[in-house]
Amino acid sequence: MDEGGNRWSELTGGRGGRRYAERFAELARTGVDVHGEARFCAALLDPGSRVLDAGCGTGRVAIWLAERGHRCVGVDSDASMLAEARRSPAPVSWVRADLGEVASLGLEPDFDMVVLAGNVIPLLASGTGAGVVSGLASLLRPGGVQVAGFGLDGAHLPLPSAPLGLADYDAWCGAAGLSLVRRFATWEGEPYAGGGYAVSVHER
């Protein structure tokens, strides 16, 4: 998750990293597959692809992909989340930064994928979404994809209601030079036919 005055930091005060990591560790111990997002992304990637995990949190997606040979960078501004991510020995480059500043970090604009998992988009600070999407899109190579999964109602968000809809997100992507390729209802790849959660794949 991204911090810096956004909805995530308002919910957690920037101190949610350990609790977040423990929650997913407990889910994994009970047999829940906590790597569905990473598996979804891997299916879209060639071996050794370059991936930007934007709003990476504790790094679940980037770590899983890096352990399978992809070259990953994780960006988040929540220090407590990155502290948990850095516990992993996986070869991921971790960067503490606000997603609104990602285009100015000096990263090479040759990523094969930008992934925004874990409700990153609706938890951005109000009024910043279009700029964040534009900055991230600028780091994709031509033909690269941006993958984002997020809730569209209060039942699928840690918020009472959704601050944006798919039409808003698609408009931001379109303005950033991204075209919708496919949309799914889950990270398991079920087709989207409406509902409270969507995973969108846009291509540059």
Image: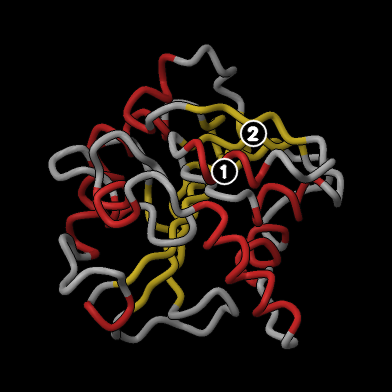
User: Residue 111 versus residue 60: which sits nearer the camera?
Assistant: 60
Give the residue at mark 2. 73
Distance from Cα at disc 2 to Cα at disc 1: 6 Å
Give the label on residue 136, or none: none
User: Residue 93 versus residue 47: which sits nearer the camera?
Assistant: 93
Mark 1 neighbour density, 10 Å: few (under 14) some (14–19) many (20 or more): many
Q: Is residue 39 above or below residue 177?
A: below
User: Residue 23 versus residue 180: which sits nearer the camera?
Assistant: 23
Q: Residue at x 33, y 78 (%)?
A: 156
User: Circle 1 — which element?
Assistant: strand
User: Residue 204 versus residue 31: which sits nearer the camera?
Assistant: 31
Q: Residue at x 36, y 77 (%)?
A: 197
Q: Is residue 139 above or below residue 37?
A: above
* Relative image position of residue 69 (x, y in whole percent): 86, 44
Q: Is residue 70 above or below residue 157?
A: above
Q: Is residue 4 above or below residue 197?
A: above
Say whether residue 51 is left or right of residue 174: right
* Relative image position of residue 31 (x, y in whole percent): 75, 87
* Relative image position of residue 91 (x, y in whole percent): 81, 35
* Relative image position of residue 62 (x, y in whole percent): 68, 47
Mark 2 neighbour density, 10 Å: few (under 14) some (14–19) many (20 or more): many
Q: Residue at x 60, y 37 (%)?
A: 74
Q: Are marks 2 and 1 in contact (CB under 8 Å)?
A: yes
User: Circle 2 — which element?
Assistant: strand
Name which residue type carries label 1: Asp
Residue 149 found in image quarter: bottom left
Name which residue type carries label 2: Val
Give the residue at mark 1. 53
Residue 11 found in image quarter: bottom left
